[in-house]
Amino acid sequence: MSELTQPKERLLIVCPGRGTYNQAEWGTLTRHAAGSDWLARFDALRREQDQPTLSELDGETPFRLSLHGRGDHASPLIYACALADALAIDRERYEICAVTGNSMGWYIALALGGALAQDDAFTLINTMGHLMQTTLNGGQLLYPWVDDQWRPQPEHRRELLALIEKLHGQDGSELYLSIDLGGMLVFGGNEAGLKRLAEELPPLERFPLRLHQHAAFHTPMQEGVKIEARTCLPATPFGAPEVPLIDGRGKLWTPWSTDPEALWDYTLGEQLVTSYDFSAALKVGVREFAPDRIVIPGPGATLGGAVAQALIQLNWWGLDSKAAFQAMQQEEPRLISMGIEEQRGWLVGK
């Protein structure tokens, strides 16, 4: 290797979950992937299921949240947008050292990390989106536990968790911690539980925020979906990843130690019915792999705030507040959201 050769920068890839494909993201897939062989295959798989194709949804059908926000449409659209971004990263300059994701982003991570082939991951994501949409059991509500500078308020967090413990079981209420999402908690529950929780939470500018067309993901309320998913999605396509994966517990799945059957069992087992600790996944990614940059593939950039909040909790690059994070990003973005075209330009091949 020439002495002038620059070492590759190490990237931690953080895959987005539901809620990231909205009006502003309509057309993203067409712009980045039109004409690709893999998108043509995905469209063919959708046609076989009598579903509108991703190309139609992204390029021909005007955006409607009631349509595009459905799990059976949103999930594969988000996967396809994230895949297009990941494939565009310049591998001459960048090395992917590990992959993780938020909630549905775990399924995308399986593809980007090489544990599932692109088409097998599409089948998984399309099927899970359909099962979640047809069941739509319960819902999710989002609420922050950090202050307006994204600094941790651990006592407030304890109070929020105690509140759901108190309300769970009262007058038919079901409430659980669904996702530990940086500086926010995502609660899952039934209508009675979410209504009582919303009444108890102090109102903030945007919160409590009910998430549109989301079921009570990562809670025991998904037991029925788990049973059906394990019946119709076999373990056969799963393999060891090509790069390390970090799951929703912070557990590492490495190329040299992964049991594919155990990976399938987690993905269509514990992952569906217990809370997803996205913050723990990021902590492991940062501390175990010391990435130069953290990359969130598109669509959109809504996951960036939660990632930044988690990085402040870890004091990554000395970050201790929202203002410090914004200053770092202005000087040199260490957290890159590929849904922002200017930041995407940092990574794609010239």
Image (tube, rainbow, N blue to C red):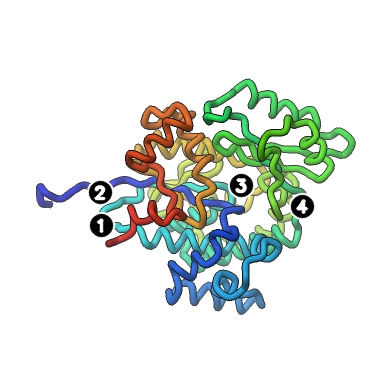
Mark in front: 3 vs 2 = 2
* Image coords of residue 291 (percent x, y): 35, 41
**Chain-order first, disc 3 or disc 2:** 2
Query: Dot 4 surroundings within 10 Å: few (below 14), some, or many (20 or more)?
Result: some
Q: Which mark is residue 92?
A: 1
- Relative to 142, does residue 57 appear above or below in the rendering? below
Q: Which mark is residue 8?
A: 2
* Image coords of residue 156 (percent x, y): 65, 24
**Chain-order first, disc 4 or disc 2:** 2
* Image coords of residue 68 (percent x, y): 64, 64
**Chain-order first, disc 1 or disc 2:** 2
Residue 257, visible in the rendered structure: no
Examine the image and state in which quarter residue 329 appears: top left
Q: Are marks 3 and 2 in contact (CB under 8 Å)?
A: no
Cα distance in 3D space between marks 1 and 4: 45 Å
- Relative to 144, does residue 191 appear above or below in the rendering? below
Between 324 and 54, the one nearer to me in the picture: 324
Q: Disc 1 residue type?
A: Glu
Q: Are marks 1 and 4 in contact (CB under 8 Å)?
A: no
Cα distance in 3D space between marks 1 and 2: 7 Å
Q: Residue tagged by mark 3?
A: 271
Q: Disc 3 residue type?
A: Gln
**Chain-order first, disc 1 or disc 3:** 1
**Chain-order first, disc 1 or disc 4:** 1
